[in-house]
Image (cartoon, helix red, strand yellow):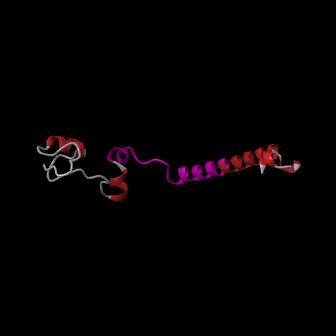
Amino acid sequence: VGIFSTNPAHNLTTQLIGVGAYGVATFSAAMLLLGAIKAIMGLRVSPEEEIEGLDISEHGMHAYDFDMGGAVSESPLAIASATPGVPLRPLAAGEEI
């Protein structure tokens, strides 16, 4: 209840000490776990996997495949702007390409 309590044992200072104690315990446990994981298997991927992308190394596939029928793999906007007849805006009602 913090600052709204009428009980002297529930004052704000007592609650701040509790929050600090939980913070110290949580931070210590997290550092121990991260230290153990780092010692056992490491926290980072190899530079090659980082450059190639984790989609390939972890799942064996690309997350975003922008290849549209033989076009160079680029962003959809770049492909649309290089494709004649593809509008770069939404079509109005009844409008055709």
Tell me if residue 5 is in the magenta stretch.
no
On the image, which quarter does residue 79 sit in?
top left
Tell me if residue 29 is in the magenta stretch.
yes
- The segment highlighted magenta reads 27-52
Q: Nearer the viewer, residue 85 or 96?
A: 96
Q: Residue at x 30, y 54 (%)?
A: 62
- On the image, the x and y values in percent for residue 15 come to 78, 47
Using residue 34 as the reference point, say whether residue 94 is left or right of it. Answer: left
Q: Nearer the viewer, residue 69 or 51?
A: 69
Using residue 22 as the reference point, say whether residue 11 is left or right of it. Answer: right
Q: Nearer the viewer, residue 79 or 72?
A: 79
Q: Residue at x 73, y 47 (%)?
A: 19
Q: Residue at x 71, y 50 (%)?
A: 22
Q: Nearer the viewer, residue 48 or 88?
A: 88
- On the image, the x and y values in percent for residue 93 come to 20, 51
In the displayed image of the protein, which residue is found farthest to the left?
A: 84
In the displayed image of the protein, which residue is found farthest to the right?
A: 8
Using residue 10 as the reference point, say whether residue 31 is left or right of it. Answer: left
In the displayed image of the protein, which residue is found farthest to the front?
A: 94
- On the image, the x and y values in percent for residue 40 come to 53, 54
Q: Residue at x 34, y 48 (%)?
A: 53
